[in-house]
Image (spheres, rainbow, N blue to C red):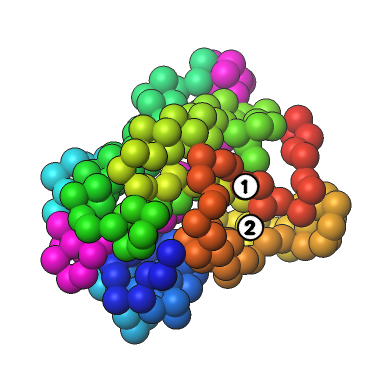
Amino acid sequence: MDIRDSTAVVTGAASGLGAATAAELVARGARVIGLDLPQVVHAAAPVDGVQYVSADVTDEEQVRAAVATAADVAPLRTVVNCAGIGTSARVVGKNGVHDLALFERVVRINLVGTFTVLALAAEVMTAQEPVDEAGQRGVIINTASVAAFEGQIGQAAYAASKGGVHSMTIAAARDLSSRGVRVMTIAPGIVDTPMLGRVSEDFRSALAESVPFPHRLARPDEYAQLAGMIVEHDYLNGETIRMDGALRMAPR
């Protein structure tokens, strides 16, 4: 799919995977509407071609407004869901049972937020004219994690949320197939994002060594490159692609 002269919505666009993806889509000719929380948007380094919009992916009205903003600029052809949070808590730990409100929050942001953006963007996409003779109207790319398949100790909430994103992919792709919208998911392994900025260099090195090949952390621009390839490869649909260097996570 050619995304020149179209718009793209990227969530979590002010940093990490989202920032790299926004820049990649701009380079491919799209106008990008970048969604993120207000405090993150205000701290973001401006990128030419990216219009930042303060929005919480769990807020239906804010997402509707952001999607409408994108559609007003040009046809909305691409959505990449990068917004998410990670936590660590055992089901029963030293301080007692897992905080149930925390579990719900992780699922709400990572899974319900992803679905909210997917559904409201698809509503707009399906009302647009097709971009090609096959009837294609757009593509939506979600972000899961290798934790969806091998959740580690302390990752019950995160693994559940990302497992839901993975499982939703084929169902959403089938739901939208008659309307010309593809749905794909990327499941990254260990990516060098700001989320890892709080760990020591020794721990980072150990993480890198755990990857079979190459022995390093993935880069956000590699995620963005894969997202761009998915956009252009019209036969990719309903699948989760692992981007992990053949990593299979150990229990801890």
Within-10-Å neighbours for mark 1: few <14, some 14–19, many 20+? some
Q: Closer to the camera, 139 or 70?
A: 139
**Placement of 95 over or under 46, stated as above or below:** above
Q: What amino acid is at disc 1? A: Ile
- The reply to whether residue 222 is visible in this rendering is yes
Start-end of magenta stretch: 68-96
Q: Amino acid at mark 2?
A: Val
Q: Nearer the viewer, residue 12 or 200?
A: 12
The verdict on residue 88 being magenta is yes
| The quadrant where residue 245 appears | bottom right
Residue 135 percent coordinates (x, y): 34, 53
Residue 142 visible? The answer is: no
Q: Nearer the viewer, residue 10 or 228?
A: 228
Q: How far is disc 2 from disc 1 in space, using C-alphas?
A: 15 Å
Which disc number belongs to residue 191? 2
Dot 2 crowding, Cα within 10 Å, few <14, some 14–19, many 20+: many
Identify which residue is drawn at 22% across, 44% down.
Answer: 123
Task: Name the spot of residue 225 as percent of width and height, x first.
Answer: 57, 67
Please give the residue where the numbered disc 1 appears in the rendered image. Answer: 241
Q: Secondary structure at mark 1?
A: strand
